[in-house]
Image: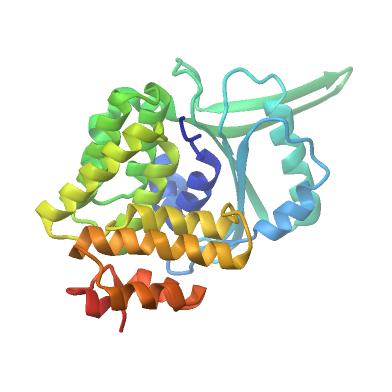
């Protein structure tokens, strides 16, 4: 059984976590005009309300971000990520209609529409798309910038060079690998290499964990290969003595709990969490003593979550249960 890649959540997390780096990599000229001393503000609730009536046939991610320019002006950036690109004749029209809706709601603010096509074939095309209408003496043309990730495939070595300073390069490398590989052993090798590079590139703990989640979501594997991947990461952590990812099981469990994917009543959830935490502790410290088993059975959900966090840096079983 193959786990389905979750591109949507991965791109949402990547854009929210690395928005300045995203802009620097794909639109450096615009990035240079933004005052990054002012944190970007994500206005997704406003965007969702505005787009509620829109038909959403294809999978894509939308972000509305407010930034401040170096000249002091406020600017709205609408970031539209097409997860399944290809040839969509309605794409340019959809970009135009969304732009109009945003312009009607925010008539005094600058508005920039940016589109990212994650798996559109690389072609000798202009870095813009447009929507045009003309009848009699009336005409209209709306043009917007487009980044096609497949255009970066010949430049993957450049992304690898940029990655230590720009974590969004890791996101792009991961999506390119997802586009090029099936859920087979070759993908297992590429996925493992990407995780290994997180340590080699010198990322700190928070970045390693976030980028690991993105890699894990984009490069899904069948269950047998997932087990091989977990063993490879476990071995990597032992070799580097850095337990940043540590608990592949814990990272995935946290994501599942946040998304409400664990089924059953709350008691059942706690039991499943306790069993997973028991496995994690056993893998790190060996046989679980009886007193620890009793604690796991008696603990509530909040306590189990705290212990799961503590197992990251614990030097002994006793440290986990403090």
Q: Is residue 281 left or right of residue 137?
A: left
Most extreme residue toward the left is 239
Relative to 123, say whether 51 is above or below. Answer: below
Residue 229 location in percent, x, y? 28, 39
* Image coloring type: rainbow
Is residue 35 visible from the viewing direction of this image? no
Is residue 290 visible from the viewing direction of this image? yes
Nearer to us in this view, 100 or 140? 100
The quarter of the picture where the C terminus appears is bottom left
Residue 152 location in percent, x, y? 36, 28
Which of the 4 quarters of the picture holds residue 170?
top left
Which of the 4 quarters of the picture holds residue 84?
top right
Most extreme residue toward the right is 136
Relative to 124, say whether 130 is above or below. Answer: below
Residue for point 25% across, 38% down: 192
Residue 19 location in percent, x, y? 46, 54
Q: Is residue 143 left or right of residue 106?
A: left
Residue for point 72% across, 24% down: 90
Residue for point 55% across, 34% down: 145
Q: Is residue 260 left or right of residue 100?
A: left
Nearer to us in this view, 86 or 295? 295
Residue for point 74% across, 41% down: 98
């Amino acid at each position: 059984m193959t786990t389905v890649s979750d591109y949507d959540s991965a791109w949402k997390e990547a854009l929210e976590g690395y928005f300045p780096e995203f802009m620097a990599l794909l639109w450096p000229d615009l990035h240079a005009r933004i005052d990054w001393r002012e944190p970007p503000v994500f206005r997704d609730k406003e965007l969702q309300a505005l787009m509620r009536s829109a038909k959403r046939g294809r999978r894509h991610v939308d972000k509305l971000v407010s930034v401040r320019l170096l000249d002091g002006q406020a600017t709205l950036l609408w970031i539209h990520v097409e997860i399944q690109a290809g040839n969509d004749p309605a794409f340019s029209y959809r970009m135009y209609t969304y732009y109009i809706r945003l312009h009607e709601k925010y008539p005094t603010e600058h508005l920039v529409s940016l589109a990212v096509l994650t798996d559109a074939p690389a072609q000798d095309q202009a870095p813009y798309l447009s929507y045009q209408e003309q009848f009699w003496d009336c005409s209209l043309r709306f043009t917007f910038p487009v980044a096609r990730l497949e255009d970066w495939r010949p430049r993957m070595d450049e992304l690898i060079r940029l990655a230590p300073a720009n974590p969004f390069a890791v996101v792009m490398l991961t999506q390119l690998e997802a586009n090029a590989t099936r859920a087979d052993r070759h993908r297992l090798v590429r996925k493992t290499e990407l995780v290994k590079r997180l340590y080699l590139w010198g990322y700190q703990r928070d970045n390693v964990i976030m980028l690991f989640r993105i890699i894990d979501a984009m490069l899904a594997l069948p269950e047998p290969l997932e087990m091989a991947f977990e063993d490879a990461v476990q071995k990597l952590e032992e070799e580097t003595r850095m337990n940043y990812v540590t608990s592949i099981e814990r990272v995935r469990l946290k994501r599942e709990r946040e998304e409400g994917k664990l089924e059953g009543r709350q008691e059942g959830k706690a039991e499943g969490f306790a069993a997973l935490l028991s496995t994690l502790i056993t893998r790190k410290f060996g046989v679980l003593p009886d007193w620890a088993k009793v604690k796991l059975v008696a603990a509530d959900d909040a306590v189990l979550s705290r212990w799961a966090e503590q197992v990251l840096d614990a030097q002994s079983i006793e440290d986990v249960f403090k």
